[in-house]
Image: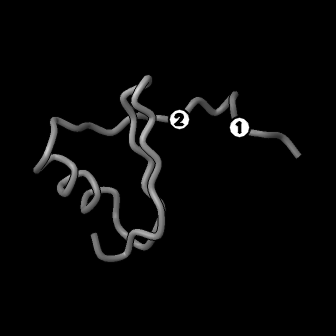
Amino acid sequence: MKGVTSFNIDFEAKKVTIVGEVTPLQALASVSKVKSAQFWTSDISAAPTT
């Protein structure tokens, strides 16, 4: 997909993380063509603190 610089597939958690210059809706539309997909929210408490 144009604009994607990297992606990570977590098969165990059934999650795909996409990084790049794409909108969330573009990414979801692209993934949804292949497999059922939906947005998920990150766990803010898991974010590293500085």
> How would you rate the neighbour count of disc 2 (Cα within 10 Å): few for under 14, some for 14-19, many for 20 or more?
few
Residue 13 against residue 28 in the figure, above or below: above
Name, please, the residue furthest toward the right: 50
* Residue 26 image position (x, y, % from top left): 25, 62
Which mark, by number, is residue 16?
Answer: none
Q: How far apart are marks 1 and 2 (CA)?
A: 9 Å
Front-most of residues 40 and 13: 13
* Residue 27 image position (x, y, % from top left): 29, 58
- Callout 1 secondary element: loop
44 horizontally vs 31: left or right:
right
Residues under numbered marks 1 and 2 in contact, where contact means CB atoms less than 8 Å apart: yes
Q: Which amino acid does label 2 sit on?
A: Ser
43 horizontally vs 15: left or right:
right
Front-most of residues 36 and 50: 36
Counting residues from the N terminus, which is met first, the one under dot 1 or under dot 2? 2
**Where is mark 2, residue-wise?**
42
- The quadrant of the picture occupied by the N terminus is bottom left
- For image coordinates 71% across by 37% down, the residue present is 47
- For image coordinates 34% across by 65% down, the residue present is 23
- For image coordinates 19% across by 57% down, the residue present is 30
> How would you rate the neighbour count of disc 1 (Cα within 10 Å): few for under 14, some for 14-19, many for 20 or more?
few
Q: Indicate the quadrant where residue 45 lies.
A: top right
1 horizontally vs 19: left or right:
left
Q: What residue type is labelled 1?
A: Ala
31 horizontally vs 4: left or right:
left
* Residue 37 image position (x, y, % from top left): 22, 38
**Where is mark 1, residue-wise?**
47
